[in-house]
Image (cartoon, rainbow, N blue to C red):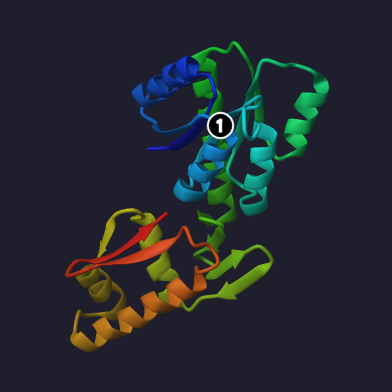
Amino acid sequence: MAKVLFIEDEPALGMIVKDSLVYRGFDVLYAANGIEGLEQFRQHQPDIVVADIMMPDMDGFTMAEHIRRDDPHTPIIFLTARSQTADVVRGFELGGNDYLKKPFSLDELIARINALLRVGASRAVANGTLKIGRYMFDPAKQKLSVDDREVTLSHREAELLRRLYQQRNEVLGRSEVLNELWGDDSFFNGRSLDVFITKLRRYLREDPKIQIINIRGRGYKLVL
């Protein structure tokens, strides 16, 4: 289920669009202004952002600037009642991926959301990379990078991180991982797994929104 962050300062329009997106199967986060939207983005790491431009407290362009400092990849669709060429150009210069003029068709908005999500997924597959918060992770090359820094993981570290990502926000069973990556779930292998989890936490510490939680007696959960 794709997670959409929708930011709109008109409450009636906001609720209509939010409910329509939920009905179509999206997981929707809603914010009423740019400040709330930026907080939601940093806390929940959505798959795509749909934002009005003209908003109180912080407009959509300013919010997008802040987002792009932390995340160059998550798609952003701007919504606006204005159609001046300068606004459109500025939106794309700030890292926007699409631009939709109000009033808009919900079907068109959903089509554009799905198109950008497909492009993002295709790029990730083509590049062999996974987006984990601020990080880009290439399981095949065992490379984990953030900003201009890169670390090469061991095969077991990379495979463990890949499995955590595949089951992100769900529990990855401890016994399952030990049997598949270590060969058995003995006490000593369990201690080794704990050490690997600690190392992955250290690798991912540049993004405080990423957590690897120990679920006592069951396993680990990568929370994004």
Judged left or right of residue 163, residue 117 is right
Q: Position of residue 88 (x, y in %)?
A: 76, 25
Mark 1 lies on residue = 33
Crowding near the residue tagged with mark 1, few <14, some 14–19, many ≥20 C-alpha atoms within 10 Å:
many
All told, the count of numbered labels is 1
In the displayed structure, 126 sits above or below 51; it is below
Q: Position of residue 59 (x, y in %)?
A: 66, 32
Q: Quadrant of the N terminus?
A: top left
In the displayed structure, 223 sits above or below 118; it is below
Q: Position of residue 39 (x, y in %)?
A: 52, 45
Q: Quadrant of the C terminus?
A: bottom left
Q: Residue at the bottom extreme?
A: 188
Amino acid found under the numbered disc labelled 1: Asn
Q: Residue at the front extreme?
A: 57
Q: Quadrant of residue 187?
A: bottom left
Q: Residue, x 56% and y 31% (percent of image)?
A: 33
Judged left or right of residue 169, residue 123 is right
Is residue 33 at least partly visible in the picture? Answer: yes
Judged left or right of residue 38, residue 16 is left
Q: Secondary structure at mark 1?
A: loop
Q: Residue at the right extreme?
A: 86
Considering depth in this image, is 199 or 166 the residue closer to the camera? 199
Is residue 141 at least partly visible in the picture? Answer: no
Considering depth in this image, is 139 or 211 the residue closer to the camera? 211
Q: Residue, x 37% and y 26% (percent of image)?
A: 22
Q: Residue, x 25% and y 81% (percent of image)?
A: 190
Q: Residue, x 32% and y 65% (percent of image)?
A: 213
In the displayed structure, 177 sits above or below 167; it is below
Judged left or right of residue 129, residue 190 is left
Q: Quadrant of residue 20?
A: top left
Considering depth in this image, is 44 or 162 the residue closer to the camera? 44
